[in-house]
Each structure stands twice: as structure tokens, then as C-alpha cells.
Image (tube, rainbow, N blue to C red):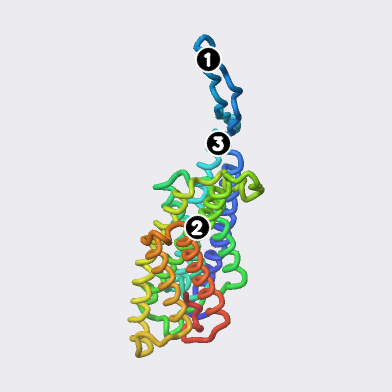
Amino acid sequence: MAGINGSMAHLSDGLFTTSIAVYAAAMVGFTAEYAFGRVGRKLEVAEPARELVGAGGPPVPDRPVVVDDAPAAGKRRRADRIGRWAVVITVLGALVHLSSIVVRAVAVDAVPWSNMYEFASVAGLVGVLAFLALLWKLPALRHLGGMILLPVILLMFLAGTVLYSQAQPLVPALQSYWLAIHVVLVSIAEGALMTSAVLTVLYLVKSRHDKLGGRPDYKPGAIGTLAAKLPSAAVLDKAAYRVVAFSFPLYTVAIICGAIWAEAAWGRYWGWDPKETWAFIVWVIYACYLHARATAGWKGRAAAWVNLAGFCAITFNFLIVNIVVSGLHSYAGLS
């Protein structure tokens, strides 16, 4: 292929595969911390009734005594060290992942997000960076790293197999500085929104467990075991909201930049191309989510479902619209 550095492209592919393996190792570490490192549930048992000797008063009613069934301190410390090392491994994986993207850019002598494989790679990296940024503010979320990395690994596996594209020169329509601006903004926004979607699912699990936990007939099962080790529903909800609040302005600017690029390339700002239509649908859904968060009757679970609907629309736009539906964006699989 003219203009393509084959050895650099091959190196980029190797780094991409290596980053998946490193993320998988970090996921194992986070899962180990989640399984063994969290403080166990507090069990409440009733203390027998006692009578105040010599006071002549009535018996003191039963009162709950908190008994801690937490794992041994040594095991907790080991799990905590594993969790810390998992963060280090995640950072290492992100650096290897970033290197694969940079090397790909050198190989094609252009920004490396001109097709679905490259876009998915960048979005996956952003998802990891969004999680690391959340850890800076909310370190209590660290043991959830395995749940955050799992969709990233699945996305990267899909990108490296089904969506993979060999390094090739940019088609003429993409040879514009708007590619660097428009697509990178979309990839950052959608990669971060993937992390928000995972946190929202965990929030829904936790809030449902909290709601049903007081019922005598409630059998928690596996979901209850998962929920018991999650941070509070308020923490998860706040984290998911912060990510959306960060991503939505970027997505808005990306749509505006895309419209400007469309006018320069096709002579119109907006033509209701399938890609443009679904990008607008995604924007509307997330705008509704942010509005719902500010509306008393829609806070909590109702707003969370709107958030998930937005990410489902993103997934549909990326996979179905790119692969199945024909449009002006079909040549590149841009998201």
C-alpha cells in the first residue's frame, strides 16, 4: 500500500493486542480485590432482654448488636495491595494502548481514527482513562475496575476481529483537519459515556437491592451478593452523572463541528443522513437525561434508564448504522 509504513502498522497491531492482555490482567486484579477485599456485611443479632438489677424497672428490650463478619485483616491488606497493583497495571495498559494509536498514526501518516477499528480503539482508551480519572476523585470505586474494563476488553476484541481494518491512506473525503477535531471529540465523549453506562447499571442493581432489602420475603441471590459489595447508590449515581456532564458538551461541539465539515465537503450543514439522524437522537436522549436529573420527579432510577437508553442509541449508531445502513458516512464507518 502506497504511503503506508507496513512495519509500523504491524507494530501497532502488536501493541493493540498486548494492551488487551494487560487490561485482562488488571481486570483479574480488580476482581480479586472485589471478591476478597471488601469489608463484609454487618450482621445484626438480637441481644437477650436484660433487667436492670436493683433499679426495680422493667426489662430492657432486645437491642441489635452489630457483628462484623469481615475477612481477616491480613486478607484485606493483601486484597488492597492487589487492587493498587491492578491500578498500576491499568495505567501500563493505557500507555501501551496509547502507543498503539500513536504508532498507527505514524504508519498511516494521518490521525488514526478514520474507520471503525481505529475509532473503537480510541473510544476504548478513553473509557479506561475516564475510569482512572474517576478514581482520582472517588477512590472507593477502585474495586469496580473489573466491571469497567470488561466492556472495554470486549469492544477492543470486537475491534481487533470483526471490525479490523488494515492501515491504509485516508480517502479524499477525509483529508481534512476537521477529521482530527470532529471524530476525536466524538470518540472522547462516547468512550466516557461507556463508563457512565456501566456505573448506571451498577447503580440500578444497588438501588433495587436497597429498595427490596427490607422485605422479609426478599431473596438476594447472586444480584444481592453483587449489590452488597457495591458503593452506595448515591456514589454510583453521582459518578455516572459526572461523566455525562463532562461528555455532553464535547458531544455537542462534535455535532456542530460535523455540520461545519459537512458544509465544506458536501455543500450543506445537515442532510438527515442516517449517521447524522442517530447522532441527533443520541444528543436529544442525553439532553433529556441531564434535564431529568434536574427534575424532582425524574431523579434516580427514572433518569438512570434514560442514561442507558442514550448509550443503547450510541451502540446502535456505531454498529447497526455503520454496518447495515447506507449513507454518506458509509465509506469510513465513522461514529
**Observer able to see residue 208:** yes
Q: Nearer the viewer, residue 54 or 282?
A: 54
- Asked which quadrant contains residue 60, the reply is top right
In the rendered structure, find residue 200 and report the number of the disc placed on it.
2
State the residue at coordinates (43%, 51%). Answer: 134
Residue 125 shows in the view: no
Callout 2 amino acid: Thr
User: Marks 1 and 3: which is nearer the front?
Assistant: 1
Q: Position of residue 161 (x, y in %)?
A: 62, 69
* Residue at mark 1: 52
- Where residue 111 sits, quadrant-wise, is bottom left
- Which tag, 1 or 2, sits closer to the chain's start? 1
Q: Residue at x 60, y 32 (%)?
A: 69
Q: Is residue 297 left or right of residue 212?
A: left
Q: Earlier in the sequence, mark 1 or mark 3?
A: 3
Between the residue at mark 1 and the residue at mark 3, the CA separation in whole angstroms equals 35 Å
Residue 183 vs residue 70, the one in the foreground: 70
Label 1: which secondary element? loop
**Helix, strand or loop for disc 2:** helix
Q: Amino acid at mark 3?
A: Val
Check disc 2: other Cα within 10 Å, few if <14, some if 14-19, many if 20+: many
